[in-house]
Amino acid sequence: MREDPPGRKVPPMTKSELIDAVAQRTNITKSRAEMVVNCIFDSMAEALQRNDGIEIRGFGSFTVREYKPYSGRNPRTGSPVDVAEKRLPFFKVGKELKELVNTPDAPAVGAAVAPGIDTDDDDDDDDGSES
Amino acid sequence: MGGDRTMTKADIIESIYEKVGGFSKKESAEIVEAVFDTIKETLRSGEKIKISGFGNFVVRAKKQRMGRNPQTGTPIVIAERRVLTFKPSQVLKNALNQRKPGRDEGQTKAPPVSSTTA
């Protein structure tokens, strides 16, 4: 339905819109849907806090990556900064969703991925998760 | 180290069943399914999703670019495509690092890094 050229901004769906959509779709009240959606993300966040991974089939998986402390620089001033060790959540999109996202509405836009190239090698620039 | 478990959809369904209450297991499963289906369909339409306190799922359009077949080294066109990225919220990042749920970890003073840790 939406034909958005790259770069064109589409308004985001917020959590409360997700709640509304779920309520409608499942015929439960909004307040029940709100409890469900909150419970889902709370339990996912708790899992990550325990250092557990999460695997949602058809959607993707989350893992926690640990980073050692390092000294970096403030990009603005150039002054050295010690960065403490930290843990960050990482999401790896599942195969089904990955394909879905790349096939907006129209069935299989001849997703002309060159043969022999595994689009999985794009760990790098796709990864929007800033430090 | 802590948890080496993996949470699955079944675990999420279980916690809906237990914590939200009032749904049968089957209903809990259907609702959880509906939540993820809604998210997937939304992302498919190119719309991003913002879950406050958790993070944003963002669809990005990647331009066509040249790449190489890593096996053979043959240059090859990588078609333009869309990818999904997840940007964790500051709240989630703080929770993972047991910092007070404030904002901007850049501001919090990092403990000095001993030069012996390499």
Image (spheres, coloured by chain):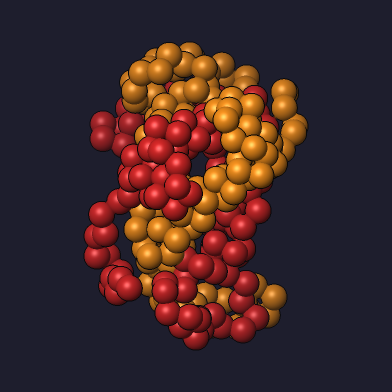
Position in image of residue B9 (x %, y %): 65, 44
Question: Which is nearer the eye, A37 or B77?
Answer: A37
Q: Is residue A79 above or below residue B79?
A: above
* Residue A11 figure quarter: bottom left
Q: Colour of chain A?
A: red
Q: Is residue B109 above or below residue B65?
A: above
Q: Does the rendering let one see residue A48?
A: no
Residue found 52% across the figure and 51% down from its top? B34
Total labels drawn: 0
Q: Colour of chain B?
A: orange
Position in image of residue B18 (x %, y %): 64, 27
Position in image of residue B116 (x %, y %): 62, 19
Left or right, A116 with reference to B89: right
Q: Does the rendering let one see residue B18?
A: yes
Q: Is residue B100 above or below residue A100?
A: above
Residue found 57% across the figure and 30% down from its top? B22
Question: Which is nearer the eye, B107 or B23?
Answer: B23
Q: Quadrant of the N terminus of chain B?
A: top right
